[in-house]
Image: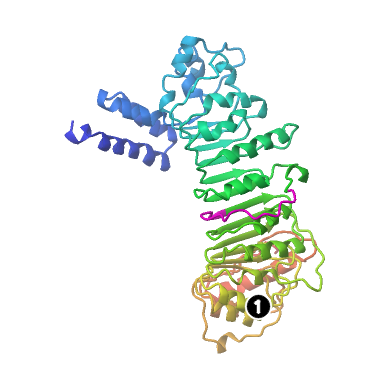
Amino acid sequence: MHQALFVCEILLNIFSHVDQSLSLSCCPRSLARKSLAALAITCKLFHEPAMDFLWADLDGIVPLLGCVTRLNPIIYQNSGMYLWSSQDIEPLSEHEARQFLRHAPRVRSLHVGTSKLFRLLANLSIETCVFPSLFSLSFMVDHPHAKYLRLFLSPTLRQCHLSVMHPDLKYIATHFTVLEHLSIELRPVDDSIADDLLLLYNSIRSCKKLATLCCPPLDWAAWRHISNLPTLLTVETNEPCRAPPSHWPLGRDTHNFAPFCNLTGLFFYVDTAAYTIAIIQHSELPSLQDFVMNVSVLPYTEAEQLCRALSQCKADQNLKHIDITARRPKVGELSSSSLTVITQFFGFTQLRTLQLEFPHCCFNLYNNLLLGAMTSWPHICSLELLDIQTLPTVTFRGLFTALLQCPCLLNLDMSIDAVRIDIDPTAESFQHTTLESLKLTRSPVTDAEAVARILFSMLPRIDQVLDQRVSVDSWNIDLYLQQWDEVNRHLDLLNGREPRNSEFE
C-alpha cells in the first residue's frame, strides 16, 4: 500500500471523490454506496472513513432498521428494499435499539418523508439523541407525528427543514446554537395553525445565527428581531394554502425595523400583496440583490404601492433581480392619477433581470419611457413585461432606439405595436448582436414579411420569435400566433432554411 494512503487527509479526500463523482454522474446513487461498502471491507485502514461516507447521507431510516437482525430479512427479502410493511411488527427491544443506533452517529444529512415506521421506535427514550452528529435534517411528516421530531433533533444541526412545529423549537437558542438555515413549510391550514404560528414566532425570536429563513408570514416582533441579525442573508415567506388573512395580523405598529444590513434575498409567495407592502414600507434593505413576489391577485393600486415602497427601501445600489408575478389576472380600475410602475425602478442602476407579470404593468409605456428605462439599466440581461390588458404603444423604432442602451440584453419578452412599421432596416446600420431570445407574440401583425426583414437585419441572433401559447379571453391570441408563425416562416427563408410548419395549418 502506498505511504500516502496512511495520511488521513489524503484518504478522506480520495473517498470524498468516490462519493461525489459517482453521485453527480449519470450512475445511480447505489453505485457510489456499493463502492464505499467495498472500500470499507478492503482493510482496517479504509474501514472507518469509508463507513463514515457510506452512512453520511440517508433518505429515511430504513437502512438503520436494516441493521436490526430481526428486521434485516424482512426489509431486504428478494432484494426489494422498501417492499414491506411495519404494521404487524413489534417495536424495537432495548437490544435492537442499540443495533439501530450503531451507525446513527455517522449520519450527517437525513431526509424523513414518512411517519409509517415511527411505531417501531416507540420504546426509544424520548431523551435519546439518536443522531448526535447530524448537520442537516428534512422532517416532512404529518402533524400528528410531530412528537417524534424530538428523536431527530441534534445540537449540531445547521440546516433544518420542517413540515410541522414542535414545542422543543422554543429552546432553539439554547439547544441548537449553530442553526443557520431554517425552513418551516406548514401543511394546509388546520385547527392547530394558531398554536403553531405562536410557537413559530417565539422560536424565530430566539434564533441568533440564522443565515436563511423560509417560513409562513411572521408577526411584527419576529420581523423586528430578524432585522437585527447580521448573519441573515435571505428570507422567504410562504403563505399556507387556505389561510385566512386573520392569521397574519400586522397590527398597527408604525415603527420601522432595524436596517437589514446584509440581507441579499427577499421572497414572498402570498395570496395578497398587503403583507409584502407593509414589510417593505417599514424596512431598509441596503444590500438587497434579489426581490421576488408571487401573489394570487395584484390590483394596480397595490402594484403602485409595492413598486414605490421598493424604490424607497434604499436598495438602489445593489438590487439586481426583480420578479413580480400575479398568478390570477384580475383587472383593476386605473385612475387618472395612475403612474407607470416601471418608472419606480429607474434608480436601480445595477438591475440585471426584471420580470413584471400583472395587469397594466405596461400602462402608459411608450417609446421615450422605454428609452429612459433602458438608459437607467445599462447592465440589464433579461426584460419580461407580460401585460395582457394594455394595448402596446412601443414601436419598432422605439424598441431599437432603447436597445442601443443595453448591449448586454439576452432575453426580451414584451408587447409592441408591430402593426405600425416606422423603421426601414435597409437605411439603418444598427444591429443588436447579443439578444438571443425574443417573444413578441401577444402583439398583432399585418405585414409579416416586413416584420421579418426588420428582425433579420437588426437582430442577427434571432432566427425565430418565440411564443407563449396561452389562451386569454380578452385577446385573440390564436390569431396573433398565426400571424407570428408567418413571421417565423419568412425568417426561415431569409436564413436559407426550409420554412417550418405551423401548428395552425
Q: Residue at x 74, y 52 (%)?
A: 272
Q: Residues within 10 Å of mark 1 (few under 14, many from 20)?
A: some
Residue 226 colored in magenta in the image: no
Q: Is residue 432 left or right of residue 333?
A: left
Q: Residue at x 64, y 51 (%)?
A: 268
Q: Horizontal and vertical percent for residue 198?
A: 68, 36
What residue would you read off at disc 1? 369
Q: What is the span of residues highlighted in magenta in the rendered image?
A: 251-265
Q: Horizontal and vertical percent for residue 94?
A: 49, 10
Q: Amino acid at mark 1?
A: Leu
Q: Is residue 454 left or right of residue 472?
A: left
The residue lying toward the viewer, choosing from 313 and 324, is 313
The residue lying toward the viewer, choosing from 487 and 126, is 126
Residue 43 in sight from this viewpoint: no
**Quadrant housing residue 222:** top right
Q: Horizontal and vertical percent for residue 366?
A: 69, 78
Rendered view: 461 above or below 36: below
Q: Horizontal and vertical percent for residue 375?
A: 56, 77
Quarter containing the N terminus: top left
Q: Is residue 82 left or right of residue 363?
A: left
The residue at the far bottom in this view is 427
Q: Main secondary structure of the magenta part?
A: loop
Q: Which secondary structure lies at badge 1?
A: helix
Q: Residue at x 67, y 68 (%)?
A: 441
Residue 360 in sight from this viewpoint: yes
